[in-house]
């Protein structure tokens, strides 16, 4: 019998974290929870600690950690409670840990994820910002430390599954393995057919109501603007060692085909499944084997049709901005990601309108172009500078 893999879940209380724990609970002979990490939701974390009995639980700050400790005081749970990014990073690199699920949303996930990479762990990457912010640095560290990097985003996991085995286990140029193009699919979000003139009046409730996926607020807004697809575009460039010109975005509203790989001989391989994140999570957890994910298979007799269109950049200017940033380089992608986090938070907080998200992102990039970043300190400084600049634009109320 194979060894039970010890797992750290970064972002345990979010949708990816909860889906991961669901898959783990279905396969107790294969996986066990070593540590859970989350932001400030102590109530949900207490539930998870009691259910999964991890050795450690880490909250983002001392206040949340104390709240969690209080909630666990009268329970049978023996979980040790810690606080802060440093504790998350230490646990991600712990000698007893086999795999780390990186599912903290945003730039906050970078340092713990890099810690897991530097410890040579199997890293299940759902935090796309890690690659968007630090692509070359991140990939170089994966190679240097012998870590295993497996993509969790449904699109990147689909591309990975459609790649030839020679590329799944080793890096190389796509063309050398017969691949001609990556086809990155996206649903188009809730505003695929909405009148463009009405987009400035989009409400938060409308923006977070994704037609196919259940996600957190930030990612839901990113899906509505298609910045999410732009960030995935940048992530794909690094994950699959390719150029921006090797990737094409395709709108597929049904979200059944999660992405495709086109080969030189005219073949196109597509990965399909119901829109449920437990499928890519289970695939990566057990790779190269397969385990139960709790997801129903597709019933092809119930499918009406598949439709595909090109993205309209007038509707999705954030997508074009991210692709342009990808071609400009690391400083640009770090800047756009940071600006977008500020802009989306401002929209969710009622400070700016929906279409102002693009304006903040574009103005921030325009104000900070041609930044050459290579080291981690330079990347973090670039990220911070972009946040300050974006915050200025939010406060100024761009006209």
Image (cartoon, grey):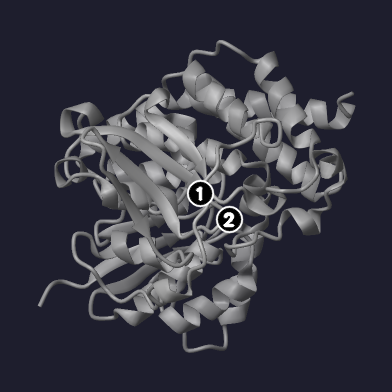
User: Which of 363/199 is in front?
Assistant: 199
Q: Quadrant of residue 26?
A: bottom left
Q: On the rendered structure, is 125 left or right of 337?
A: left
In the image, 36 versus 330, the foreground residue is 330
Image quadrant where one finds the C terminus:
top right
Q: Is residue 261 left or right of residue 244?
A: left
Q: Position of residue 249 (x, y in %)?
A: 49, 37
Does dot 2 land on a helix, a strand or a loop?
Answer: loop
Task: Judge the density around disc 1: few (<14), some (14-19), many (≥20) Cα neighbours within 10 Å.
Answer: many
Residue at the image position 42 percent from the left and 22 percent from the top:
375
Residue 85: image tag: 1
Where disc 1 sits, the SS reads: helix
Point out the image quarter for the N terminus. Answer: bottom left
Which residue appears at 53% of the width and 28% of the height?
Answer: 380
Q: CA distance from mark 2 to mark 1?
A: 7 Å
Note whether residue 325 is visible.
Answer: yes
């Amino acid at each position: 019998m194979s060894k039970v893999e010890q797992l750290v879940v970064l972002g345990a209380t979010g949708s990816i974290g909860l889906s991961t724990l669901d898959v783990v609970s279905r396969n107790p002979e294969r996986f066990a929870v070593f540590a859970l990490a989350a932001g400030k939701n102590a109530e949900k974390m207490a539930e998870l600690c009691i259910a999964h009995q991890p050795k450690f639980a880490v909250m983002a700050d001392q206040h949340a950690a104390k709240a969690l400790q209080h909630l666990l005081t009268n329970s049978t749970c023996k979980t040790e409670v810690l606080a802060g990014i440093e504790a998350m990073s230490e646990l991600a690199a712990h000698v007893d840990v086999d795999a780390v699920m990186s599912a903290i949303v945003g730039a906050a996930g970078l340092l713990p994820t890099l810690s897991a990479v530097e410890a040579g762990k199997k890293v299940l990457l759902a935090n796309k910002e890690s690659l968007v912010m630090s692509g070359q640095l991140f990939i170089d560290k994966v190679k240097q430390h012998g870590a295993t990097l497996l993509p969790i985003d449904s699109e990147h996991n689909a591309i990975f599954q459609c790649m030839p085995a020679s590329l799944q286990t080793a890096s190389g140029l796509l063309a050398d393995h017969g691949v001609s193009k990556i086809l990155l699919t996206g649903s188009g979000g809730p505003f695929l057919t909405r009148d463009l003139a009405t987009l400035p009046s989009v409400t938060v409730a409308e923006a977070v109501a994704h037609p196919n996926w259940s996600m957190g607020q930030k990612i839901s807004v990113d899906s509505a603007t298609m910045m999410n697809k732009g960030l995935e575009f940048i992530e794909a460039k690094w994950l699959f060692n390719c150029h921006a010109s090797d990737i094409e975005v395709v709108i597929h509203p049904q979200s059944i085909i999660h992405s495709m790989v086109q080969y030189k001989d005219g073949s196109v391989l597509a990965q399909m499944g119901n829109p449920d994140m437990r499928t890519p999570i289970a695939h990566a957890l057990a790779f190269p084997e397969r385990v139960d994910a709790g997801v129903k298979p597709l019933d092809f007799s119930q499918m009406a049709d598949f439709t595909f269109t090109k993205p309209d950049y007038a509707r999705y200017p954030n997508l074009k901005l991210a692709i342009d940033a990808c071609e400009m380089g690391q400083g640009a992608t770090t800047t756009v990601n940071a600006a977008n986090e500020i802009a989306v938070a401002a929209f969710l907080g009622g400070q700016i309108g929906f279409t102002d998200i693009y304006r903040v992102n574009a103005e921030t990039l325009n104000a900070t172009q041609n930044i050459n970043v290579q080291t981690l300190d330079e990347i973090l400084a670039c990220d911070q500078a972009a946040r300050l600049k974006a915050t200025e634009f939010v406060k100024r109320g761009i006209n």
